[in-house]
Image (cartoon, rainbow, N blue to C red):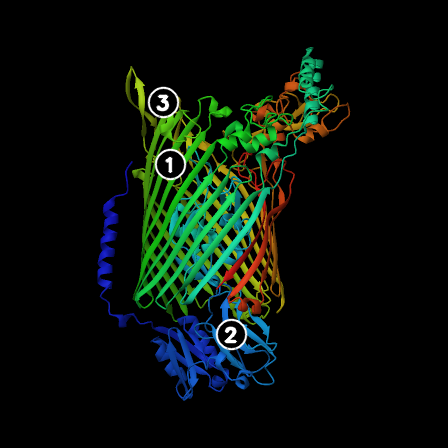
Amino acid sequence: MKKIESHRISFVFLFLIMLLSTSGTLPAQTQKDLYNVKLDNLTLKEAMVKITSQSGYYFVYEDADIVSVPKISKEFRSSSIEQIMAECLKGTGLSFKIEKKVIYIKKEGKSANPGKDPKKLSVSEDSLYVFGKVTDVNNLPLPGASVEVKGAKNKGVVADYDGNYRLRLTDATKESTLVFNFLGMQKQEVSIDGRREINVALREMENELEQIVVVGYGVTKKKDIAGSIENISASELAKTNSQNFQKAIQGKMSGVQITSSSGIPGSSFSINIRGRGSINADTQPLYIVDGVQITNGAQNTNILTNADVMAGLNPDDIESISVLKDGASASIYGAQAANGVVIITTKKGASGKTRVSINATTGIQEIARKVPVMSGPQWAQFALLEYKNYDLYNGTNKYQDQLNLFKSFGWGDDGYSNAPTTDWYDEIFRKAVVNNYQINLSGGTEKTKFYLSAGYNKTDGIIKQTGFNRKSARLNLSHEIAPWLTINSNNTFSGTVHNQSSVVGAANPARTAMFLLPGVSPRDENGEYYSDLTYGYFLYNIPQMLELNEYVGKTHNLLSANDLTLKLAKGLEFKSSYNFDLTWLNEHQFSDPRTRLGSRVNGSIAANSTDINKFQTEQVFTYNTTINENRLTAVAGFSYSSYQYHMIGAEANGVSSPDLKLLSSAATPIATTESYSEWKMAGFFGRVSYAIRDKYIFTGTVRYDGSSRFGKDNLWGLFPSISFAWRMKEERFLKDIDWLNDLKIRASYGVTGNASIGDYVSARLYAANSAYGGSSGIIPSSIGNQKLTWEKKHSKNIGITAGIFKGRISTNIDFYSDDTKDLLYYRVIPQTTGFSEIPSNMGGVRNQGLDLQLNVVSFDTDNFSWETSFNLSWCKNEITELQDGLDELGQYKVGKPITSENVYRWAGVNTSDGRPMYYDKDGYITYNPTLEDRVWTKGTDPTFFGGIDNTFRWKNLTFSFFFQFQRGAVKYFNDKAVLIGQAADNNLLEEMYNSYWSNPGDVTWVPKPVLDGAYPGNPMKYDNNGETRMSLIYESTDFIKLKNVNISYNLPEKLVKKLKLQDAQIFANGYNLWTTTPYQGYDPESVGIDRGVYPQSKSYSIGIKINF
């Protein structure tokens, strides 16, 4: 395998070293910020708003001082803030003073200080003042926030740099209402009610066009977005109080389907953005945390299953999540962005006094849904009926033998009336405790800011002896070395423990809870565990195995993002970043010799140690400028990543003592394994965005990526995109329509790539330890393909963004069509080559759909508000092309979804004799269908999915509830094939007992009970333990779920101050509380084949949040 030539990369590093060495000598005075500002017949207050938006400086003033200033008409080019202010105030009798990023304006001869300390005023003077602090919901000050007396002209002030304000009242206004306002925040009105101190926390205005959204290699204003991007804030994440951020955002974003692979704590989630775009390559998005590209997916090793690589990330540290859905938004990440991009930004510090926040939660969780199975008497009676009907058709006497056996168990003279019922759900499952504790500190000076946090989460699993622990710490630092040089370092270290169910395969606890016979007990009369159960097909004593066996994985992860930013010239910045993602995984499995599984080899021990190291560096130039009234933004950069994986493991049998669980204590080594792989990737990228008069926004992006996973013929790939946005609201014919506050048309086209395949798929590989003629040697194991190239997704998107009634109703609607070509798959070749297949590019997949997001503020008053957020997604997935023009290939068919399957079609039960029936290809009844009679199912991914979230606020009380839904998918319920079986040695669905055919004319889906399905004419067995794919085993996964309910109460201000706190909140939360679905398994939402999937839980929790 040929790697990327190192001399190309070395040239870039050499260039950067030269640049850094010269930039360090730049004089500080050349770095001073200069601005272009045009003031066209504006009042001084309007001019200050414009200056703030372009410079970031805030103003403190009194309305009475500036009301008589004439309007200003001036244009400034390359001017400092001091020059601009001096010109604006010339001849007005006003002066100004700049402290940090705050400009104080006063009448000449009057103090620029906001005033005396209001707490030290005299009684008579105090009665005419009200004072306090304006912050956001995170207790960060809002400098420049306006505070006005409602209805009083020219009666207002502006908060200073720390958010403090002091407002002089009159006898006429001292019992009025104050109005607090800040750009990007929702206005709040508070009655004075005789109070002298009033502190407020303003909420974000979610539909504010100036809101900043994180995009690839930068940020942009919401109004400038031309692609399709979803954004989730920290306040939205806090609603679920979940230990996993993916769980917290399920159903909250259109076009983003998030499903859990398992209910076990710490397990991975599957995120499909706008459908599945690949047959064989990975379909999961690219994760980026503070600029670090994370190796995504589940950790599936020899021991651990579905352990999430993102489980170490503490949701309490997350500030926002942006999801780039369309090709134009994601193409800046090129070859890794075909499945979309998830950008996670963590919290940062802010200047000012240190703020401390504590969050503590405790709760319980239990299994959300149980599969109803037969009781002891029901199962025994049904089993005897199977034997009796078998004898009727086959002339045997098995019924009497079975009846005598059941009598010997003491189950009564009829063989079933006195049969006991062991509740295997109670034996295997439990009510589990969940505890979550977080603390963070943030603050700093004007030059140095910090955010420090620590978290502890302990989640016991609903299956006994399972669970997940996480300890995490984060330190985010930012330091301004000079006005032209800033360094940032964002670091998190986490340690997790995955305690997974200690039995797998046929002994899976979730499966056996359904299958184990109800008439059998796990313990003898003395309360001691049996090694083997006494009767039935499944003899594993699951409660004993859970108690004695171990199945543990311990992971430590260091994620470090470090960068320095240089301001090279006005509008030009250079950012050099160096990032590390280091993971150490240690796993241990122990099978106790006292269990059925361990007794075969006198106990066994397995251990693995895995190191995963990823390094990434990026060098990015950003340029922003204004040309007349047009804005130009350009980004150009280089990226390099390297990844190394190393695993070593061993296994041994013959444990000398159950108390000695080390490999060295086992007598017989069985196997040692070691594997190593690596890959490298480099890329060059650029983006140019040009906004004409804030109406027409054009953006073009290109990325050129090279990957070591491909051969020399296709090492590099080009991924371009273009997008356009037309802000129609800014046109003259719409600008004066008051009820319409936003209308934008968006269109984009982009190409992204997928290289998520094995590290050496394109190379010809050899296997060692092969023997020939008594000698060891190596043999070819993979044919390789040097012409293998990237999967490429061509994405087209058209969207509409609209807002009416001052943002009370807003919506985003997107129509998309994504075509993935050159799929990475294995082409079938003649076996005379020595191989059966070769990795190739072949075929195509198309996803077409609609994304809808609707936000409505139904009420918004001082004491009450009601907000609703609704999202709906429709996606049609289909294969457009297969190998060599074939219409069908294996389990795939052109025109059908990727996840569709070819199955026999169930026709029900013959009403006259109770035999199972099927349809042939022409729709006629048959008892023995052929391969040609099979039909294609729906896919396992829903056609429609979405959610609706309602939030009510009344004074200090907030109540929210969230429903999630999906429709149009089926899932292969593999366990149902056993639960409706006719082997008479495992438990069955309770519905089998209540609905089986017994008399001519009965209409039911349950055939006449006959042992082994031995009906006259030998019809096809409808269960066959799942080996025969039957439509009866595929069930609809349509559902509606009450996914989350949250109620919170902010403690009264007087009580908070008495406790010497900034604010405090108590809350209660319920998760996954209710489900309606036709699906009979544990959960309709789980991914893939339902074969013993760890069930989902429902949980209840209470907690408290305190800010100091």
Which of disc 3 and disc 1 is earlier in sequence?
1
Please name the residue shown 46% across and 28% down the image. Answer: 592
Residue 641 point in image, percent of width and height: 32, 47
Residue furthest toward the front?
Answer: 526
Residue of label 2: 132
Residue of label 3: 834
Q: Depth check: 1026 or 364 in front? A: 364
Q: Which mark is residue 758?
A: 1
Q: Is residue 699 left or right of residue 984?
A: left
> Residue 833: which quarter of the image?
top left
Disc 1 vs disc 3: which is toward the camera?
Answer: 1
Mark 2: amino acid: Gly
Mark 1: amino acid: Gly
**Label 2 neighbour load within 10 Å: few <14, some 14-19, many 20+:** some
Disc 1 vs disc 2: which is toward the camera?
Answer: 2
Q: Is residue 549 left or right of residue 516?
A: left
Secondary structure under the numbered disc 3 in the rendered image: loop
Residue 1011 point in image, percent of width and height: 65, 19
Which of disc 2 and disc 1 is earlier in sequence?
2
- Residue 733 in view here: yes
Query: What is the C-alpha distance between the residues marked 1 and 2?
Result: 60 Å
Q: Depth check: 185 or 19 in front? A: 185
Secondary structure under the numbered disc 1 in the rendered image: loop
Which of disc 3 and disc 2 is earlier in sequence?
2
Residue 176 point in image, percent of width and height: 61, 79
Q: Is residue 674 left or right of residue 415?
A: left
Query: What is the C-alpha distance between the residues marked 1 and 3?
Result: 21 Å
User: Does 67 appear above or below 886?
Assistant: below
Secondary structure under the numbered disc 2 in the rendered image: strand
Mark 3: amino acid: Gly
> Which quadrant is home to the N terminus?
top left
